[in-house]
Image (spheres, rainbow, N blue to C red):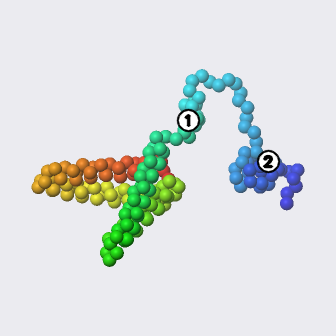
Amino acid sequence: MADPSDGSLCPSCGEFIPAAAPRCSRCGFETRPAPAPVGPLPPGNPYGPTSGGAVFIRHPDADKPIWQDAAFRVMAYVVLIDGILELVSGIITLIVAKGSDNGGPLVGHGALVTLVGVGLLAEWPWASLAIKICCWVNLVVAVGMLLVGGVVARAFPLLGVLVILLTLAFGAAYGFMLYLVNTVGLD
């Protein structure tokens, strides 16, 4: 062990820091005090680039929640509620139609969607990947449904327009969720 007079222990992690070291080798804790400012602050925006070095100071409002955080939380609750409703409807279908297999896929998919909703609210990275995959798959399906809506609209105009409008609404919701996951960045 080194002589204590030749250094000190890091207040952050407890590692021995030699007297000549500027920082802790384990955690990077600065051991030397920052230099005192020489003169008054220059006029202008203190958060913009400084002259000569283009160094930016982080704005104090940068860590405040943005609207995307709130929207992501709302959409995560929508995913969770959708999964719970699908799970409950699958269980009810299994109980009511005892001889049929109609409720099994609903229960499985509902449990998976509920788990993804919980993962989004808990901010687990795997849930972010799962919802991205789900959104992309559903956007591809929405394009196919728009084509189906166009074909149906030729025979039954009112029904075709309804299919197209619902498909656009669901496609917009999936696209919005994809935008939020990419903006908030759980990865």
- Image vertical order of residue 54 relative to residue 92, above or below: above
How packed mark 2 is, by other alpha carbons closer than 10 Å (few <14, some 14-19, many 20 or more), is: few
Q: Which residue corresponds to mark 2?
A: 20
Residue 55 in view:
no
The image position of residue 131, as x and y in percent, is 42, 57
Name of the residue lying farthest toward the left? 155
Labels 1, 2: front one:
1
Residue 83: quarter of image: bottom left
- The residue sitting at 40% across, 63% down in the picture is 88
Q: Earlier in the sequence, mark 1 or mark 2?
A: 2
Q: Which residue corresponds to mark 1?
A: 61
- Image vertical order of residue 90 relative to residue 148, above or below: below
In the picture, measured across the screen, residue 97 lies left or right of residue 45, that is: left
Where disc 1 sits, the SS reads: helix
Label 2 sits on what residue type?
Answer: Ala
Instruction: Give whichever of 92, 113 is nearer the camera.
Output: 92
